[in-house]
Image (tube, rainbow, N blue to C red):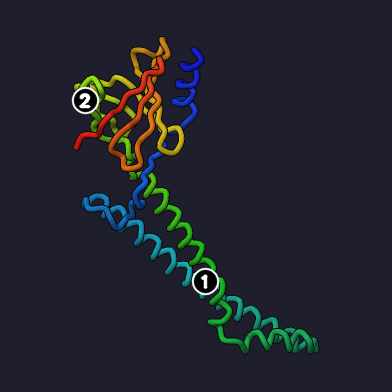
Amino acid sequence: MKRLVVALSAFILLPLVAFSESPLTRVEDFESDSARDVVSKFKERIAFLEARMDEQLASADKDLRTGLKEALASSVAAGELKEVERISKFLQQDPGDQGKKPVQTDVAVLRRRVAELERKLALATATDPIVGKWRYHNNNICDYTADGWVTLNGKAIGLWRRTTGRQYVVAFVRAFAKGVSDDMVLSADGKTIAASGAKGQKFQIVRLP
């Protein structure tokens, strides 16, 4: 019963996180026209936002300078010499110097967000190394699917979940009530699985080409 609780807890509490020990998939790696089209539109939108940001900052800087010129005239009329000096120094600076820093800062933030989105996209599209066809010690050939199912002859017989690192647990659908599940460790080369059954029996599972 304790083994059943542990197994079911793994399926309820642990999300199926896509994982790969190989380098992460990049958006540049997509080959289908539909995926490339989505990525292209995304990058076009980011470029548009950057251009609009430059336009907005330039417009804001122009309005600022217009307003400060009016304030300068008022300060001159009021004889506020210190304020006249401060406003004059500001207006004498190159307008590009005023907008340069915030533009760079905002673009850097956008680029970080793009990088984060690409990282999440890479994780979402990566394939777990256990996915594939496996031959059991009794010669059954099971298919471990990317969405977390174990199938035999096209029928779902269990669910797999990664627990930590290369360790997995497989709970068999028709045997939940009996607490039947296998603990498995994927080899470093991804070609074999060292498995331990519900009664402690040890066996090996071999990946098929």
Query: Dot 2, how many residues are within 10 Å of its Cα: few (below 14), some (14-19), or many (20+)?
Result: some
Read off the residue under disc 1.
Answer: 103
| Disc marking residue 148 | none
Look at the numbered disc 1 and give the secondary structure of its residue.
helix
Q: Relative to 63, does residue 27 appear above or below in the rendering?
A: above
Query: Dot 1, how many residues are within 10 Å of its Cα: few (below 14), some (14-19), or many (20+)?
Result: some
Horizontal placement of 103 versus 130: left or right? right
Question: Which residue reaches farthest front?
Answer: 202
Residues at discs 1 and 2 in contact (Cβ within 8 Å): no
Residue 16 image-quadrant placement: top left
At which x and y percent is residue 182?
38, 22
Horizontal placement of 146 versus 59: left or right? left
Residue at (80% x, 89% y) in the render: 79
Read off the residue under disc 2.
Answer: 141
At which x and y percent is residue 28?
29, 58
Q: Amino acid at mark 1?
A: Val
At which x and y percent is residue 66?
60, 80
Q: Relative to 122, does residue 207 appear above or below in the rendering?
A: above
Name the one closer to the observer, 202 or 143: 202
